[in-house]
Image: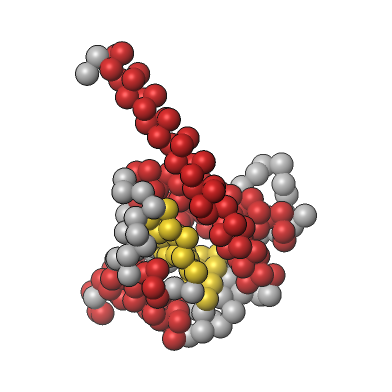
């Protein structure tokens, strides 16, 4: 591929991202604000946010939790917000996978540390990972609010959780980009609501 062909491809990808973001705003804008309000209400009432994802979304979920616990903006000094990622503890994940099966790696954590009044947030590009489905079912059984940020058609998860935001795109990389954008937006609004 020549340098000029690469520049043309880069422009196409950029245009696709910009157009997608505008379409997402029209489609998901109010849902993002509603989820932000719900997260702020959970944390404001003494609950915590439990976040899980697989692969790249495990990393994006960890970034989201890190920004809730620390801060998203260096100009806003505020209290830490209670959030945990269920995807980061290798010893816990491998123990649960070894003893119960990979499907249980998040559900076992929700059983142990989740309480009524908390919120579980699942991150997935497809909505079909068995471990996230099991986690959402466990959250529901414990009276924990379950939410999901999904791609494509939302898969099975969108029918299980209390609230699902679905990015209707087929490309996983575009879905992840939008999920990261939405998560940053959520932190921004939750910070403003709770720490103004």
Question: Quick one: 52 or 77, which is closer to the camera?
Answer: 52
Front-most of residues 168 and 72? 168
Colouring scheme, one of rainbow, by chain, secondary structure, one colour = secondary structure
| Numbered circles on residues, count | 0
Q: Is residue 88 above or below residue 171?
A: below
Residue drawn at the location 36% of the way across and 49% of the way down: 169
Q: Quadrant of residue 9?
A: top left
**Which quadrant: the N terminus?**
top left
Residue at figure coordinates x 73%, y 49% from the top left: 77
Q: Estimate the x, y position of residue 179 in percent, counting from the top left.
A: 45, 51
Q: Is residue 100 above or below residue 189?
A: below
Q: Position of residue 174 (x, y in %)?
A: 38, 43
For residue 90, above or below residue 72: below
Could you tell me which residue is drawn at 42 percent across and 53 percent down? Answer: 167
Q: At x 34% / y 55%, what residue is drawn?
A: 152
User: Who is closer to the viewer here, 48 or 167?
Assistant: 167
Can residue 182 be seen here? The reply is no
**Residue lying furthest right in this view?**
196
């Amino acid at each position: 591929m020549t340098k000029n062909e690469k520049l043309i491809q880069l422009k196409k990808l950029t245009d696709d991202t910009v157009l997608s973001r505008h379409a997402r705003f029209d489609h998901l804008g109010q849902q993002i604000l509603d989820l932000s309000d719900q997260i702020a209400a959970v944390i404001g009432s003494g609950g915590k946010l439990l976040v899980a994802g697989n692969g790249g979304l495990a990393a994006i979920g960890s970034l989201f939790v890190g920004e809730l616990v620390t801060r998203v903006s260096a100009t806003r000094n505020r209290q830490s917000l209670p959030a945990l990622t269920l995807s980061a503890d290798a010893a816990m994940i491998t123990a649960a996978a070894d003893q119960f099966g990979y499907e249980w790696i998040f559900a076992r954590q929700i059983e142990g540390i989740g309480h009524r009044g908390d919120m579980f947030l699942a991150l997935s590009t497809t909505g079909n990972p068995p471990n996230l489905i099991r986690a959402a079912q466990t959250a529901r059984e414990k009276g924990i609010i379950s939410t999901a940020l999904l791609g494509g058609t939302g898969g099975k998860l969108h029918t299980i959780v209390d609230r699902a935001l679905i990015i209707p795109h087929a490309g996983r990389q575009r879905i992840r980009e939008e999920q990261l954008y939405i998560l940053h937006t959520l932190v921004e609004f939750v910070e403003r609501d709770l720490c103004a």
